[in-house]
Image: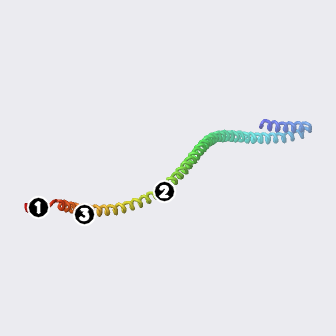
Amino acid sequence: MIAWIAAGVLAVALVVVAIAFNNTVRDKNAKIADTLAQLDKAKAGSAQLQTQLDQAKAGAAQLQAQLDQAKANSAQLQAQLDKANAGSVQLQAQLDKAKAGSAQLQAQLDKAKAGAAQLQAQLDQAKKGSAQLQAQLDQAKADSAQLQAKSKDATAKAADLQTKLDQAQSQIVQLQTPLPKKGR
């Protein structure tokens, strides 16, 4: 690019020189001096442009290095993003599985609660039946106690009657025994 600029500047200088040759020698000398001054100025500008070009090349090389580093960082970030996405997919699958397991456990819990409610109703019914049976048992014990008391009374009366019967039989036997005859 500097070569083009230099060539452009050189071409301008040559045009100026050609014009100077068309003028008179005196004008030519003045113009040659002027052209040489312009040439020196163009050379200085060309050197300055060369310096700017070298600086631009160095800046471009630095920017290229930064671009390469940015591309490497971008590739690394893309790999991390891909890994994170894969992990996210895996976590989503685990979450879906956990939700399905939770739904299944909830169904089992609901079924267990229904079973527990049914068992509670049966337990309440059994308690009610047990209370009724306990009341019947208590009544039966009371009746049994009364019957035992009556049985004792009956046994005592039977024993008394047996004693009386034995006495009565003894008296009957005595009455049936003939009395010894007197005098013989």
Point out which mark residue 160 bears: 3
* Residue nearer the viewer, 156 or 143: 156
Tell whether 147 sits left or right of 104.
Answer: left
Q: Quadrant of the N terminus?
A: top right
Asked if labels 3 and 1 touch by Cβ distance under 8 angstroms, the answer is no
What's the amino acid at mark 1? Lys
Q: Secondary structure at mark 1?
A: loop
Q: Residue furthest front?
A: 184
Question: x%, y% of residue 22?
Answer: 92, 37
Question: x%, y% of residue 159?
Answer: 25, 61
Sequence-first disc among 1 and 2: 2
Question: As displayed, is residue 11 above or below residue 135?
Answer: above
Q: Secondary structure at mark 3?
A: helix
* Residue nearer the viewer, 27 or 158: 158
Asked if labels 2 and 1 touch by Cβ distance under 8 angstroms, the answer is no
* Spatial CA span between label 2 and label 3: 51 Å
What's the amino acid at mark 3? Asp
Mark toward the viewer: 2 or 3: 3
* Spatial CA span between label 1 and label 2: 85 Å
Asked if labels 3 and 2 touch by Cβ distance under 8 angstroms, the answer is no
Can you identify the residue that label 1 sits on? 181
Q: Residues within 10 Å of mark 2 (few under 14, many from 20)?
A: few
Sequence-first disc among 1 and 3: 3
* Residue nearer the viewer, 114 or 144: 144
Tell me where residue 16 sits by quadrant.
Answer: top right
* Residue nearer the viewer, 108 or 81: 108
Tell whether 50 sits left or right of 99.
Answer: right
Query: Going 50% across and 55% down the picture, which residue do you hit?
Result: 121
Can you identify the residue that label 2 sits on? 125
What's the amino acid at mark 2? Gln
Mark toward the viewer: 1 or 3: 1
Q: Secondary structure at mark 2?
A: helix
